[in-house]
Image: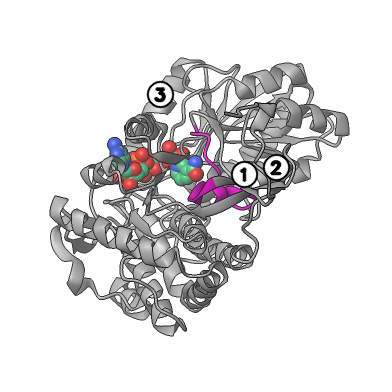
Amino acid sequence: MGIRGILRELGVDLKMQKGKDIVVTSPIDGDVIASLKADDASSMEQKIARCQNAFEIWRDVPAPKRGEFIRIFGDELRKAKEPLGKLVTMECGKILEEGKGEVQEMIDICDFAVGLSRQIGGSTLPSERLNHNMQENWLPLGPIGVISAFNFPVAVWAWNFALAVICGDSVIWKPSDKTPLCALACQAIFNRAVKKYDGSVPAGLCEIAFGFVNIGEQLVNDRRIALVSATGSSRMGAIVGPQVAKRFGKTLLELGGNNAAIVTPSADLDVALPSILFGAVGTAGQRCTTTRRVFVHDSIYNELFGKLENAYVSLAEKIGNPLKSGSLIGPLIDENSYESMQNALQIAAGEKGKIIGGKRVLEKKFPNSFYVHPALVRMPEQTPIVQKETFAPILYVMPYKDLADAIKQQNDVAQGLSSAIFTKDISEAAIFKKYSDCGIANVNIGTSGAEIGGAFGGEKETGGGRESGSDSWKAYMRRQTSTTYYGKDAPALAQGVSFSA
Ligand code: NAD
Protein backbone atom coordinates (compact mmCIF):
# COMPACT_ATOMS: atom_id res chain seq x y z
CA MET A 1 0.00 0.00 0.00
CA GLY A 2 1.32 3.46 -0.91
CA ILE A 3 1.40 6.55 1.23
CA ARG A 4 -2.05 7.69 0.10
CA GLY A 5 -3.62 4.38 1.11
CA ILE A 6 -1.94 4.48 4.51
CA LEU A 7 -3.02 8.05 5.18
CA ARG A 8 -6.57 7.15 4.11
CA GLU A 9 -6.59 4.16 6.45
CA LEU A 10 -5.43 6.42 9.27
CA GLY A 11 -8.13 8.96 8.46
CA VAL A 12 -5.70 11.76 7.56
CA ASP A 13 -7.13 14.45 5.33
CA LEU A 14 -4.16 16.18 3.73
CA LYS A 15 -6.32 18.86 2.15
CA MET A 16 -6.49 20.87 5.38
CA GLN A 17 -2.72 21.09 5.64
CA LYS A 18 -1.72 21.16 1.99
CA GLY A 19 0.91 23.75 1.08
CA LYS A 20 4.39 24.35 -0.19
CA ASP A 21 6.38 25.06 2.95
CA ILE A 22 7.30 21.62 4.25
CA VAL A 23 8.30 19.14 1.57
CA VAL A 24 8.25 15.66 3.08
CA THR A 25 10.47 13.05 1.48
CA SER A 26 10.72 9.41 2.46
CA PRO A 27 14.26 8.38 3.40
CA ILE A 28 13.44 4.97 1.87
CA ASP A 29 13.76 6.21 -1.72
CA GLY A 30 13.97 9.99 -1.52
CA ASP A 31 10.51 10.38 -3.11
CA VAL A 32 8.40 13.37 -2.14
CA ILE A 33 5.41 11.98 -0.24
CA ALA A 34 3.66 15.20 0.77
CA SER A 35 3.95 18.93 0.78
CA LEU A 36 2.44 20.83 3.70
CA LYS A 37 1.65 24.29 4.88
CA ALA A 38 3.66 25.56 7.88
CA ASP A 39 2.24 27.66 10.68
CA ASP A 40 3.07 31.34 10.94
CA ALA A 41 3.14 33.69 13.91
CA SER A 42 -0.59 34.42 13.71
CA SER A 43 -1.81 30.82 13.33
CA MET A 44 0.53 29.90 16.19
CA GLU A 45 -1.03 32.61 18.33
CA GLN A 46 -4.47 31.10 17.68
CA LYS A 47 -3.27 27.59 18.49
CA ILE A 48 -1.58 28.63 21.73
CA ALA A 49 -4.68 30.59 22.77
CA ARG A 50 -6.90 27.53 22.08
CA CYS A 51 -4.50 25.36 24.05
CA GLN A 52 -4.61 27.79 27.00
CA ASN A 53 -8.39 27.84 26.86
CA ALA A 54 -8.54 24.03 26.75
CA PHE A 55 -6.32 23.85 29.81
CA GLU A 56 -8.68 26.07 31.79
CA ILE A 57 -11.54 23.66 31.07
CA TRP A 58 -9.71 20.33 31.18
CA ARG A 59 -8.05 20.93 34.57
CA ASP A 60 -11.50 20.79 36.20
CA VAL A 61 -12.35 17.38 34.75
CA PRO A 62 -11.75 14.73 37.47
CA ALA A 63 -8.48 12.89 36.85
CA PRO A 64 -10.09 9.41 36.46
CA LYS A 65 -12.39 10.90 33.77
CA ARG A 66 -9.31 12.27 32.04
CA GLY A 67 -7.87 8.78 32.30
CA GLU A 68 -11.00 7.40 30.64
CA PHE A 69 -10.25 9.57 27.62
CA ILE A 70 -6.70 8.23 27.42
CA ARG A 71 -8.07 4.68 27.66
CA ILE A 72 -10.19 5.35 24.57
CA PHE A 73 -7.27 7.02 22.81
CA GLY A 74 -5.14 3.92 23.57
CA ASP A 75 -7.86 1.67 22.09
CA GLU A 76 -7.86 3.76 18.91
CA LEU A 77 -4.08 3.41 18.76
CA ARG A 78 -4.40 -0.37 19.03
CA LYS A 79 -6.64 -0.33 15.94
CA ALA A 80 -4.20 1.91 14.08
CA LYS A 81 -1.03 0.06 15.04
CA GLU A 82 -0.32 -1.45 11.63
CA PRO A 83 -0.83 1.63 9.41
CA LEU A 84 0.72 4.04 11.91
CA GLY A 85 3.75 1.75 12.25
CA LYS A 86 4.04 1.77 8.44
CA LEU A 87 3.82 5.55 8.32
CA VAL A 88 6.59 5.82 10.93
CA THR A 89 8.72 3.57 8.72
CA MET A 90 7.95 5.57 5.58
CA GLU A 91 8.66 8.93 7.15
CA CYS A 92 11.72 8.19 9.30
CA GLY A 93 13.09 4.99 7.74
CA LYS A 94 13.20 2.64 10.74
CA ILE A 95 12.27 -0.97 9.98
CA LEU A 96 8.59 -1.88 10.18
CA GLU A 97 9.09 -4.02 13.28
CA GLU A 98 10.49 -0.97 15.07
CA GLY A 99 7.83 1.30 13.57
CA LYS A 100 5.13 -0.91 15.08
CA GLY A 101 7.18 -1.15 18.28
CA GLU A 102 7.02 2.60 18.55
CA VAL A 103 3.22 2.51 18.32
CA GLN A 104 3.22 -0.21 20.99
CA GLU A 105 5.13 2.21 23.24
CA MET A 106 2.31 4.71 22.72
CA ILE A 107 -0.24 2.08 23.71
CA ASP A 108 1.81 1.08 26.76
CA ILE A 109 2.11 4.65 28.02
CA CYS A 110 -1.65 5.09 27.62
CA ASP A 111 -2.25 2.00 29.79
CA PHE A 112 0.21 3.34 32.34
CA ALA A 113 -1.43 6.77 32.33
CA VAL A 114 -4.93 5.31 32.79
CA GLY A 115 -3.83 3.57 36.00
CA LEU A 116 -1.99 6.66 37.12
CA SER A 117 -5.12 8.79 36.70
CA ARG A 118 -6.45 7.18 39.90
CA GLN A 119 -3.16 7.41 41.78
CA ILE A 120 -1.57 10.83 41.32
CA GLY A 121 -1.43 12.25 44.80
CA GLY A 122 0.78 13.90 47.35
CA SER A 123 1.97 13.12 50.85
CA THR A 124 0.51 14.10 54.15
CA LEU A 125 3.35 15.38 56.30
CA PRO A 126 3.60 15.78 60.07
CA SER A 127 3.22 19.35 61.27
CA GLU A 128 5.34 20.58 64.19
CA ARG A 129 2.35 22.51 65.49
CA LEU A 130 -0.60 21.23 67.53
CA ASN A 131 -3.87 20.81 65.58
CA HIS A 132 -2.31 21.51 62.21
CA ASN A 133 -2.00 19.23 59.25
CA MET A 134 0.25 19.66 56.27
CA GLN A 135 -0.22 18.15 52.88
CA GLU A 136 1.08 18.35 49.35
CA ASN A 137 -1.36 18.91 46.51
CA TRP A 138 -0.40 18.20 42.90
CA LEU A 139 -2.27 20.47 40.52
CA PRO A 140 -2.43 20.74 36.72
CA LEU A 141 0.45 22.85 35.39
CA GLY A 142 -0.74 24.54 32.19
CA PRO A 143 -0.35 24.14 28.43
CA ILE A 144 2.62 21.90 27.64
CA GLY A 145 4.78 22.54 24.56
CA VAL A 146 6.27 19.37 23.12
CA ILE A 147 9.14 19.64 20.63
CA SER A 148 10.19 16.30 19.15
CA ALA A 149 12.99 14.81 17.06
CA PHE A 150 12.69 12.93 13.77
CA ASN A 151 13.81 9.54 15.05
CA PHE A 152 10.88 8.88 17.42
CA PRO A 153 8.15 10.66 15.49
CA VAL A 154 5.19 9.37 17.54
CA ALA A 155 6.28 7.71 20.82
CA VAL A 156 7.96 10.74 22.38
CA TRP A 157 4.87 12.88 21.86
CA ALA A 158 2.67 10.10 23.28
CA TRP A 159 4.86 9.79 26.39
CA ASN A 160 4.28 13.48 27.02
CA PHE A 161 0.70 13.66 25.84
CA ALA A 162 -0.75 10.72 27.80
CA LEU A 163 0.77 11.88 31.09
CA ALA A 164 0.03 15.57 30.52
CA VAL A 165 -3.62 14.85 29.71
CA ILE A 166 -4.29 12.73 32.80
CA CYS A 167 -2.53 15.44 34.84
CA GLY A 168 -5.07 17.99 33.55
CA ASP A 169 -2.90 19.80 31.01
CA SER A 170 -3.35 20.58 27.33
CA VAL A 171 -0.58 19.96 24.78
CA ILE A 172 0.75 21.79 21.75
CA TRP A 173 3.20 19.70 19.74
CA LYS A 174 5.83 20.80 17.25
CA PRO A 175 6.99 17.63 15.51
CA SER A 176 10.22 17.49 13.52
CA ASP A 177 9.77 19.06 10.08
CA LYS A 178 11.05 15.72 8.74
CA THR A 179 8.08 13.78 10.15
CA PRO A 180 4.92 15.94 10.11
CA LEU A 181 2.68 13.24 8.59
CA CYS A 182 3.05 11.11 11.70
CA ALA A 183 1.78 14.08 13.71
CA LEU A 184 -1.22 14.52 11.39
CA ALA A 185 -1.99 10.82 11.84
CA CYS A 186 -1.83 11.15 15.65
CA GLN A 187 -4.25 14.06 15.47
CA ALA A 188 -6.67 12.03 13.34
CA ILE A 189 -6.54 9.20 15.91
CA PHE A 190 -7.05 11.74 18.71
CA ASN A 191 -10.11 13.12 16.88
CA ARG A 192 -11.64 9.63 16.68
CA ALA A 193 -11.11 9.17 20.43
CA VAL A 194 -12.78 12.54 21.07
CA LYS A 195 -15.91 11.34 19.23
CA LYS A 196 -16.08 8.17 21.31
CA TYR A 197 -15.48 9.80 24.69
CA ASP A 198 -18.45 9.94 26.99
CA GLY A 199 -17.74 13.50 28.00
CA SER A 200 -16.53 16.59 26.34
CA VAL A 201 -13.01 17.31 25.24
CA PRO A 202 -12.32 21.03 24.83
CA ALA A 203 -11.03 22.24 21.47
CA GLY A 204 -7.31 22.85 21.78
CA LEU A 205 -6.47 19.93 24.09
CA CYS A 206 -4.21 18.54 21.36
CA GLU A 207 -2.78 21.18 19.05
CA ILE A 208 -0.10 20.60 16.44
CA ALA A 209 2.28 23.31 15.28
CA PHE A 210 3.82 22.61 11.90
CA GLY A 211 7.06 24.16 10.82
CA PHE A 212 10.73 24.70 11.36
CA VAL A 213 12.91 26.08 14.13
CA ASN A 214 11.07 29.44 14.18
CA ILE A 215 7.85 27.67 15.18
CA GLY A 216 9.68 25.85 17.98
CA GLU A 217 11.06 29.20 19.09
CA GLN A 218 7.58 30.65 19.35
CA LEU A 219 6.60 27.90 21.79
CA VAL A 220 9.83 28.37 23.69
CA ASN A 221 9.28 32.09 24.13
CA ASP A 222 5.56 32.10 24.93
CA ARG A 223 4.85 32.66 28.63
CA ARG A 224 1.59 30.70 28.43
CA ILE A 225 3.53 27.49 27.77
CA ALA A 226 4.17 26.33 31.32
CA LEU A 227 6.52 23.49 30.40
CA VAL A 228 8.59 23.02 27.27
CA SER A 229 9.38 19.33 26.86
CA ALA A 230 12.04 19.25 24.15
CA THR A 231 13.62 16.16 22.63
CA GLY A 232 16.51 16.47 20.21
CA SER A 233 20.17 17.35 20.01
CA SER A 234 22.15 18.82 22.91
CA ARG A 235 22.82 21.76 20.59
CA MET A 236 19.07 22.46 20.49
CA GLY A 237 18.74 21.97 24.27
CA ALA A 238 21.55 24.43 24.91
CA ILE A 239 19.45 27.09 23.16
CA VAL A 240 16.00 26.08 24.41
CA GLY A 241 16.94 25.58 28.10
CA PRO A 242 18.24 29.13 28.76
CA GLN A 243 15.50 30.73 26.62
CA VAL A 244 12.74 29.12 28.68
CA ALA A 245 14.62 29.81 31.93
CA LYS A 246 14.75 33.51 31.01
CA ARG A 247 10.98 33.70 31.31
CA PHE A 248 11.02 31.38 34.39
CA GLY A 249 9.23 28.61 32.48
CA LYS A 250 9.92 24.93 33.13
CA THR A 251 11.78 22.58 30.82
CA LEU A 252 12.03 18.85 30.41
CA LEU A 253 15.04 18.19 28.19
CA GLU A 254 15.73 14.84 26.50
CA LEU A 255 18.88 15.38 24.47
CA GLY A 256 21.82 13.59 22.90
CA GLY A 257 23.51 10.42 24.10
CA ASN A 258 26.89 8.78 23.62
CA ASN A 259 26.22 5.46 25.23
CA ALA A 260 28.73 2.78 26.15
CA ALA A 261 28.73 -0.90 27.07
CA ILE A 262 31.46 -2.52 29.18
CA VAL A 263 32.21 -6.21 28.60
CA THR A 264 34.08 -7.84 31.49
CA PRO A 265 36.05 -11.13 31.44
CA SER A 266 33.16 -13.04 33.08
CA ALA A 267 30.56 -11.85 30.53
CA ASP A 268 28.47 -14.40 28.64
CA LEU A 269 29.31 -13.38 25.08
CA ASP A 270 26.14 -15.04 23.79
CA VAL A 271 24.22 -12.48 25.84
CA ALA A 272 26.53 -9.56 25.11
CA LEU A 273 26.88 -9.97 21.34
CA PRO A 274 23.22 -9.68 20.24
CA SER A 275 22.59 -6.88 22.73
CA ILE A 276 25.55 -4.86 21.46
CA LEU A 277 24.57 -5.54 17.87
CA PHE A 278 20.96 -4.41 18.30
CA GLY A 279 22.14 -1.40 20.31
CA ALA A 280 24.66 -0.36 17.66
CA VAL A 281 22.90 -1.00 14.34
CA GLY A 282 19.18 -1.03 15.27
CA THR A 283 17.32 2.00 13.83
CA ALA A 284 20.50 2.41 11.70
CA GLY A 285 22.28 3.88 14.73
CA GLN A 286 19.74 6.71 14.97
CA ARG A 287 18.49 6.27 18.52
CA CYS A 288 19.45 8.52 21.40
CA THR A 289 20.26 5.28 23.26
CA THR A 290 22.28 3.69 20.42
CA THR A 291 25.42 1.89 21.63
CA ARG A 292 28.28 3.94 20.21
CA ARG A 293 31.19 2.77 22.38
CA VAL A 294 32.22 -0.62 23.78
CA PHE A 295 34.99 -1.12 26.34
CA VAL A 296 36.14 -4.75 26.30
CA HIS A 297 38.53 -6.29 28.79
CA ASP A 298 41.95 -6.93 27.27
CA SER A 299 41.70 -10.68 27.89
CA ILE A 300 38.63 -11.10 25.63
CA TYR A 301 39.05 -8.14 23.28
CA ASN A 302 40.16 -10.13 20.23
CA GLU A 303 37.56 -12.86 20.78
CA LEU A 304 34.66 -10.39 21.04
CA PHE A 305 35.95 -8.18 18.24
CA GLY A 306 36.20 -11.26 15.96
CA LYS A 307 32.58 -12.18 16.72
CA LEU A 308 31.43 -8.61 16.13
CA GLU A 309 33.36 -8.49 12.87
CA ASN A 310 31.65 -11.68 11.62
CA ALA A 311 28.27 -10.31 12.63
CA TYR A 312 28.96 -6.98 10.89
CA VAL A 313 30.06 -8.69 7.67
CA SER A 314 26.84 -10.71 7.61
CA LEU A 315 24.77 -7.53 8.01
CA ALA A 316 25.30 -6.81 4.29
CA GLU A 317 22.23 -8.91 3.40
CA LYS A 318 20.10 -7.22 6.05
CA ILE A 319 20.36 -3.66 4.75
CA GLY A 320 17.45 -2.56 2.61
CA ASN A 321 13.94 -1.22 2.27
CA PRO A 322 12.71 -1.04 5.89
CA LEU A 323 9.18 -1.97 4.83
CA LYS A 324 10.35 -5.38 3.55
CA SER A 325 10.54 -8.29 5.97
CA GLY A 326 14.13 -9.45 6.38
CA SER A 327 15.52 -5.91 6.42
CA LEU A 328 17.15 -5.09 9.74
CA ILE A 329 18.80 -1.83 8.74
CA GLY A 330 17.00 0.93 6.89
CA PRO A 331 18.36 4.19 5.52
CA LEU A 332 19.84 7.21 7.26
CA ILE A 333 17.43 10.11 7.47
CA ASP A 334 19.19 12.24 4.87
CA GLU A 335 22.37 13.23 3.08
CA ASN A 336 23.56 15.46 5.95
CA SER A 337 23.47 12.48 8.23
CA TYR A 338 25.48 10.44 5.71
CA GLU A 339 28.04 13.25 5.36
CA SER A 340 28.48 13.56 9.10
CA MET A 341 29.01 9.80 9.33
CA GLN A 342 31.70 9.86 6.62
CA ASN A 343 33.33 12.84 8.24
CA ALA A 344 33.47 11.10 11.64
CA LEU A 345 34.96 7.95 10.08
CA GLN A 346 37.63 9.98 8.34
CA ILE A 347 38.58 11.61 11.64
CA ALA A 348 38.51 8.22 13.40
CA ALA A 349 40.92 6.81 10.80
CA GLY A 350 43.22 9.76 11.50
CA GLU A 351 43.01 8.93 15.21
CA LYS A 352 44.29 5.39 14.55
CA GLY A 353 40.91 3.67 14.15
CA LYS A 354 40.70 0.62 11.84
CA ILE A 355 37.33 0.71 10.12
CA ILE A 356 35.20 -2.19 8.92
CA GLY A 357 32.15 -1.18 6.84
CA GLY A 358 30.82 2.36 6.91
CA LYS A 359 30.37 2.74 3.13
CA ARG A 360 27.25 3.73 1.24
CA VAL A 361 25.34 0.78 -0.27
CA LEU A 362 22.33 0.27 -2.60
CA GLU A 363 22.99 3.60 -4.32
CA LYS A 364 22.03 2.22 -7.75
CA LYS A 365 18.69 1.00 -6.49
CA PHE A 366 18.07 4.08 -4.32
CA PRO A 367 20.09 6.95 -5.83
CA ASN A 368 18.22 9.56 -3.76
CA SER A 369 18.52 7.94 -0.37
CA PHE A 370 21.36 6.97 1.96
CA TYR A 371 21.79 3.37 3.04
CA VAL A 372 25.09 2.54 4.74
CA HIS A 373 26.85 -0.55 5.92
CA PRO A 374 27.21 0.04 9.69
CA ALA A 375 30.78 0.82 10.73
CA LEU A 376 32.75 -1.20 13.29
CA VAL A 377 35.90 0.58 14.42
CA ARG A 378 38.82 -1.06 16.20
CA MET A 379 39.99 1.86 18.30
CA PRO A 380 43.15 1.63 20.42
CA GLU A 381 41.82 4.20 22.89
CA GLN A 382 39.04 6.74 23.42
CA THR A 383 39.88 9.76 21.24
CA PRO A 384 37.97 13.05 20.73
CA ILE A 385 35.86 11.73 17.83
CA VAL A 386 34.71 8.79 19.99
CA GLN A 387 33.57 11.26 22.64
CA LYS A 388 31.26 12.97 20.15
CA GLU A 389 27.71 11.80 19.31
CA THR A 390 27.60 11.06 15.57
CA PHE A 391 23.96 10.19 14.83
CA ALA A 392 24.73 7.20 12.57
CA PRO A 393 25.75 3.54 12.99
CA ILE A 394 29.38 3.77 14.12
CA LEU A 395 30.56 1.47 16.91
CA TYR A 396 33.97 2.16 18.45
CA VAL A 397 35.45 -0.84 20.28
CA MET A 398 38.24 -0.16 22.77
CA PRO A 399 40.23 -2.37 25.17
CA TYR A 400 40.45 -1.80 28.94
CA LYS A 401 42.52 -3.30 31.75
CA ASP A 402 40.84 -2.15 34.92
CA LEU A 403 37.06 -1.86 35.57
CA ALA A 404 37.35 1.41 37.48
CA ASP A 405 39.18 2.89 34.51
CA ALA A 406 36.59 1.53 32.04
CA ILE A 407 33.78 3.17 34.03
CA LYS A 408 35.79 6.41 34.18
CA GLN A 409 36.21 6.38 30.40
CA GLN A 410 32.55 5.52 29.90
CA ASN A 411 31.68 8.61 31.95
CA ASP A 412 34.22 10.77 30.14
CA VAL A 413 31.79 12.19 27.58
CA ALA A 414 29.53 15.23 27.67
CA GLN A 415 26.32 13.18 27.65
CA GLY A 416 24.92 10.84 30.32
CA LEU A 417 21.99 8.92 28.87
CA SER A 418 22.43 5.13 28.80
CA SER A 419 25.10 2.64 29.85
CA ALA A 420 25.45 -1.13 30.17
CA ILE A 421 27.73 -3.76 31.65
CA PHE A 422 27.96 -7.40 30.64
CA THR A 423 29.21 -9.46 33.57
CA LYS A 424 28.39 -12.46 35.74
CA ASP A 425 30.17 -10.92 38.70
CA ILE A 426 27.69 -9.26 41.08
CA SER A 427 30.36 -7.10 42.58
CA GLU A 428 31.30 -5.68 39.16
CA ALA A 429 27.61 -5.09 38.44
CA ALA A 430 27.13 -3.27 41.75
CA ILE A 431 30.23 -1.09 41.25
CA PHE A 432 29.09 -0.22 37.72
CA LYS A 433 25.62 0.81 38.89
CA LYS A 434 27.15 2.92 41.66
CA TYR A 435 29.57 4.82 39.44
CA SER A 436 27.91 5.03 36.01
CA ASP A 437 26.89 8.67 35.68
CA CYS A 438 24.04 7.89 33.28
CA GLY A 439 20.27 8.03 33.75
CA ILE A 440 20.11 4.41 32.60
CA ALA A 441 22.55 1.72 33.83
CA ASN A 442 21.71 -1.78 32.60
CA VAL A 443 23.23 -5.12 33.56
CA ASN A 444 23.38 -7.81 30.87
CA ILE A 445 20.98 -5.75 28.76
CA GLY A 446 22.03 -3.36 25.99
CA THR A 447 21.84 0.43 26.15
CA SER A 448 18.80 0.77 23.91
CA GLY A 449 15.17 -0.39 24.10
CA ALA A 450 13.80 1.00 27.38
CA GLU A 451 10.41 -0.04 28.82
CA ILE A 452 7.87 2.67 29.55
CA GLY A 453 7.50 1.72 33.25
CA GLY A 454 10.81 3.29 34.26
CA ALA A 455 11.70 6.98 34.16
CA PHE A 456 13.54 7.68 30.90
CA GLY A 457 16.26 10.29 30.52
CA GLY A 458 19.84 11.17 31.29
CA GLU A 459 22.27 13.49 32.99
CA LYS A 460 24.76 16.16 31.91
CA GLU A 461 24.27 17.29 28.28
CA THR A 462 21.43 14.77 27.90
CA GLY A 463 19.45 17.42 29.76
CA GLY A 464 18.44 15.92 33.11
CA GLY A 465 14.76 15.42 32.22
CA ARG A 466 12.75 12.28 32.95
CA GLU A 467 9.81 11.11 30.85
CA SER A 468 7.48 8.16 30.74
CA GLY A 469 7.24 5.90 33.83
CA SER A 470 7.88 6.03 37.58
CA ASP A 471 7.12 9.51 38.96
CA SER A 472 7.86 11.40 35.71
CA TRP A 473 4.24 12.64 35.83
CA LYS A 474 5.34 15.19 38.43
CA ALA A 475 6.94 17.28 35.65
CA TYR A 476 3.46 17.95 34.26
CA MET A 477 1.98 19.22 37.55
CA ARG A 478 2.71 21.93 40.07
CA ARG A 479 3.29 21.14 43.72
CA GLN A 480 1.46 23.03 46.41
CA THR A 481 2.09 22.73 50.15
CA SER A 482 -1.01 23.36 52.21
CA THR A 483 -1.11 23.63 56.00
CA THR A 484 -4.51 23.64 57.72
CA TYR A 485 -5.19 24.67 61.30
CA TYR A 486 -8.22 23.07 62.87
CA GLY A 487 -7.86 24.24 66.50
CA LYS A 488 -9.84 26.85 68.37
CA ASP A 489 -7.17 28.94 70.11
CA ALA A 490 -4.90 31.45 68.40
CA PRO A 491 -2.74 29.42 65.99
CA ALA A 492 0.91 28.75 66.89
CA LEU A 493 3.66 30.06 64.66
CA ALA A 494 6.27 27.81 63.07
CA GLN A 495 9.69 27.51 64.73
CA GLY A 496 8.03 28.38 68.05
CA VAL A 497 8.11 32.09 67.22
CA SER A 498 6.12 34.10 69.74
CA PHE A 499 4.31 37.17 68.38
CA SER A 500 1.68 38.26 70.83
CA ALA A 501 0.78 41.91 70.64
P1 NAD B 1 17.29 18.45 16.39
O1 NAD B 1 17.87 19.01 17.64
O2 NAD B 1 17.86 18.88 15.11
O3 NAD B 1 15.72 18.78 16.32
C1 NAD B 1 14.82 18.36 17.31
C2 NAD B 1 13.61 19.28 17.34
O4 NAD B 1 13.99 20.55 17.87
C3 NAD B 1 13.01 19.56 15.96
O5 NAD B 1 11.61 19.56 16.06
C4 NAD B 1 13.55 20.95 15.65
O6 NAD B 1 12.76 21.67 14.74
C5 NAD B 1 13.54 21.59 17.02
N1 NAD B 1 14.46 22.71 17.22
C6 NAD B 1 15.73 22.80 16.79
N2 NAD B 1 16.28 23.96 17.21
C7 NAD B 1 15.34 24.61 17.92
C8 NAD B 1 15.29 25.87 18.61
N3 NAD B 1 16.32 26.70 18.65
N4 NAD B 1 14.14 26.22 19.23
C9 NAD B 1 13.08 25.39 19.22
N5 NAD B 1 13.05 24.20 18.57
C10 NAD B 1 14.17 23.81 17.93
O7 NAD B 1 17.38 16.84 16.53
P2 NAD B 1 17.07 15.69 15.45
O8 NAD B 1 18.13 15.67 14.41
O9 NAD B 1 15.63 15.75 15.02
O10 NAD B 1 17.21 14.37 16.37
C11 NAD B 1 18.42 13.77 16.68
C12 NAD B 1 18.93 14.18 18.05
O11 NAD B 1 17.92 14.01 19.05
C13 NAD B 1 20.09 13.32 18.53
O12 NAD B 1 21.04 14.13 19.18
C14 NAD B 1 19.44 12.35 19.51
O13 NAD B 1 20.32 11.80 20.47
C15 NAD B 1 18.40 13.23 20.14
N6 NAD B 1 17.30 12.47 20.70
C16 NAD B 1 17.22 12.38 22.07
C17 NAD B 1 16.22 11.63 22.65
C18 NAD B 1 16.14 11.47 24.15
O14 NAD B 1 15.11 11.01 24.62
N7 NAD B 1 17.17 11.81 24.91
C19 NAD B 1 15.28 10.97 21.84
C20 NAD B 1 15.37 11.11 20.46
C21 NAD B 1 16.39 11.86 19.90
Q: Would you identify the image quadrant in which residue 445 lies?
A: top right
Q: Which mark is residue 277?
A: 1
What secondary structure is marked by label 2? helix
What secondary structure is marked by label 1? helix
* Disc 2 and disc 1 in contact, CB within 8 angstroms: yes
Query: Given the image, on which type of amino acid does mark 1 rest?
Result: Leu
Q: Quadrant of the C terminus?
A: top right
Q: Would you identify the image quadrant in which residue 239 lies?
A: top left
What secondary structure is marked by label 3? helix
Residue 410 magenta-highlighted: no
Query: Given the image, on which type of amino acid does mark 2 rest?
Result: Leu
Question: Between tags 3 and 1, which lies in front?
Answer: 1
Question: Marks 2/3: CA distance?
Answer: 26 Å
* Disc 2 and disc 3 in contact, CB within 8 angstroms: no
In the rendered view, would you say 348 is above or below 284?
above
Of marks 3 and 1, which one's residue comes earlier in the chain?
1
- In depth, the one of 166 and 76 nearer the eye is 166
Q: Which mark is residue 273?
A: 2
Residues rendered magenta in the picture: 462-479
Of marks 2 and 3, which one's residue comes earlier in the chain?
2
In the rendered view, would you say 189 is above or below 279?
below
- Residue named by callout 3: 346
The residue most toward the front is 501
Report x, y in % for residue 142.
40, 53
Q: Residue at x 40, y 78 (%)?
A: 200
Q: Which mark is residue 90?
A: none
Report x, y in % for residue 334.
32, 45
